[in-house]
Amino acid sequence: MQRTSLNVQQHSKSLHASRPRFKRGWIWNQLFVEEEDPTPHVIGQLKSDYDTGDFSIKYILSGEGAGEAFSIDEYTGEIRSLGKLDREEKAFYVLRAQAIKRGSDQPVEPESEFIIKVQDINDNAPEFLNEPYVASIPEMCPVGTTVVQVTATDADDPMFGNNAKLIYSILQGEPYFSVEPKTGIVVTSWPSMDREAREMYLVVVQVKDMLGLSGGYSATTTVTITLSDVNDNGPTFQHNLYTFAVAETAAVGTTVGRVMADDGDVGMNARMNYSLEDLEESATFSIHTDPMTQEGVVVLAKPLDYERKRRFVIAIEAINDLVDSRFLSSDEFRDRATLKIMVTDVDEPPIFSAPLYEWKILENAPVGTQVGIVSARDTDAANNPIRYSFDKNSDMRKVFRIDSNNGTITVVKPLDRETADWHNFTITAKETKENYLSSSVTVFVKVLDVNDNVPVLSREYQPYVCESTQSGQLIQVISAVDADDPSEGHHLYFAMVPERQINPNFTLRDNQDNTASILARRSTFTRRDRTYYHLPVVLIDSGTPALSSTTTLTISVCACQPAGHCPTGGVEAMALSMGLSMQTLLGFSVCLITLAALSILMLAVQKHRKHQMGKLETVEQDTEEFSEKVLRYAETSNFGGDSGLSQPVPMRPHPRRRERRLRREEVAASIRMSLRNSHLIGPEDEVFRQFIMDRLAEADQDPYVPPFDCLKTYAFEGTGSATGSLSSLESLTFESSAERPPDSRPRLLRLSPWQGAREEETTF
């Protein structure tokens, strides 16, 4: 409203400044109209100097509100208010007045502006700003502490009377708070307000206009005032003694109980720590603070044993995290109480004296030797008797025995470290009364080594010596092993047999690393002299007492290749080292070759079965013709000519068997020829002579084999044999036949060379 009045004054000044001063022709007083007056009424009159009252002058009104809010009597110039006005909407109106000569419409006065002011009345109540009002102050604050300032406004004109002049007062909140009447500042008026007694206050403030005089308007607002906490209280236990019970089998970490010290403060001021003061310093229990509830949580820190200790008496203390010396002394921020914890008895299984048992015993310990003793006891007050047994999943009754009464374990079977060096089993101890509880323990028995195994060669050796070997040359390096396990490791020694220390052919050198070298003592070994040598070797261990063994090595003589490799050293040396005779080796070789040849023949027979069946008749005819030719040849040969005394004797027809026998003889002849060439065996060799005799016996017993002499087929006859042919014709003794005279002529014998038949005479 003040701003509106200033605008009216400034506008009036501008009107006077913008126009030149004339002799005033208009006559009127300052015009006012009260707001909110609904009755039309005259508020003033405009009049020209030229108006003589004959109604010859006509007045015309224009400008703001003309015709709506204000009107003018065209004859008298009276200004009339037409209705209710609101100063808060418009404080003044600027209008223009004009006087003209009636009938000619000629102005008698220049047009003039004038102002009508709307006069204020107290029609508006004050209003509070920035509602709602909320404030917080610390408890225990001094009197006069500013809480908050409330502010109100009034829409009436502050420049006109007391309509907009406000004053504040307290309707609710005394005697704790008061308000300054002119500024609206709310302050404390009660000393040391305590949040724990009352935390929130509602203060009602009233404002009035017209300086609180009667007839004015008023308004109220509520201020919510909260007291914030300060640390003016210490923790306090509600009881001097707290009692808890816990079972002796409770696990470490189990919560035993909770305690709580009350603190009237909140938030940071109520935080506290708990501690235990164990007079026995056993540290069996611990305590920590629950951050959500600020309770002290008592926790089991060590295992309990009812039989050892049944009651604990502990001092407990609570202390604030924050200490504010403005309100309390340091001692008032802590409190103490007593904590009693009772241990309850629980029936427990037996307890072994050790978590596990580990024993050692020599492997040569006799049956009945005590290995060790397990011991368990019932820790409960009842102290029930205990019985011991092997766990059924680790039954060792075949090796050990346990005394069920005292837990003594003894050996019932000889031990062997080389078979089992550890024995692991489980022993069960069980109560014989009440709940029959049981527990188990693991037992480890280590079998200690005893020198009860002789050293042996690490593998089977097949040494050989080349014919060109020189004295001192290395023949073979041998190594040995021992099944025992001495604590200081193996140290094996090699030596010759005592009665054969001086060996003219070989010597033995101990390399001191569990190996030995066989060296030649002479040069030039020949197979013609000997094909193999036997070398006894003594192996000695370092045990106490020392054990020894003797191993005989078979060293074969070989016609080595230039690089020192023995081509026949594989089979022959193996046979010699295995102690086999040459006859056995030769028979084994013949069997292998015969099996291979028979396999090939069987495949060929199966493949050509159809062809052979088709030619069966032809084969029979050829066979009969061949048999007749053989007999005729025998009659006309050098055995005495054709005497006519012998008649042809046909052989029994058995074409298939004969054909198979002929093939077998061809294969056997090829095998014999190949063996002769490969092994270079001489006629003086016993193996060869035995082989020939076996083949002759086979031919003599086979009725389907033709005479070897008639077929011009010879086995090896030998070189320089004085006994003549070894063929089947003369291998048996026949009596002289009356039908065939004895042949006095010398016999013509065709001898196969020692090196074997020619290629065209050999089929393999």
Image: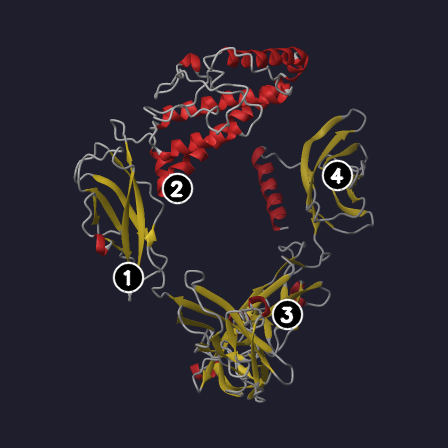
Q: Nearer the viewer, residue 162 or 288?
A: 288
Compared to residue 305, the image places residue 12 above or below, namely: above
Label annotation for residue 424: none
Mark toward the start of the polypeptide (4 vs 3): 4
Looking at the image, is mark 3 or mark 1 nearer the viewer? 1
Residue 518 shows in this picture: yes
Mark toward the start of the polypeptide (4 vs 2): 4
- Find residue 151 and report its horizontal and vertical position in percent: 61, 60
Q: For mark 3, what is the residue? A: 169
> Distance from label 4 to label 2 (Cα)?
152 Å
Compared to residue 435, the image places residue 16 above or below, namely: above
Mark 2 and mark 3 in contact (Cβ < 8 Å)?
no
Mark toward the start of the polypeptide (2 vs 1): 1
Q: Secondary structure at mark 1?
A: loop
Which three-letter amino acid code belongs to the residue tagged 2? Leu
- Find residue 437 and report its horizontal and vertical position in percent: 61, 79
Seen at 63% across and 76% down, the residue is 174
Which three-letter amino acid code belongs to the residue tagged 1? Glu
Label annotation for residue 488: 1
Q: For mark 4, what is the residue? A: 65
Mark toward the start of the polypeptide (3 vs 2): 3
How many neighbours does mark 2 have within 10 angstroms: few (below 14), some (14-19), or many (20 or more)? few
- Find residue 124 and report its horizontal and vertical position in percent: 71, 56
> Distance from label 4 to label 3 (Cα)?
42 Å
Q: Nearer the viewer, residue 685 or 108?
A: 685
Mark 1 and mark 4 in contact (Cβ < 8 Å)?
no
Which three-letter amino acid code belongs to the residue tagged 3? Ser
How many neighbours does mark 4 have within 10 angstroms: few (below 14), some (14-19), or many (20 or more)? some
Q: Secondary structure at mark 3?
A: strand
For residue 357, what is the image quadrant?
Answer: bottom left
Q: Nearer the viewer, residue 10 or 46?
A: 10
Looking at the image, is mark 4 or mark 3 nearer the viewer? 3
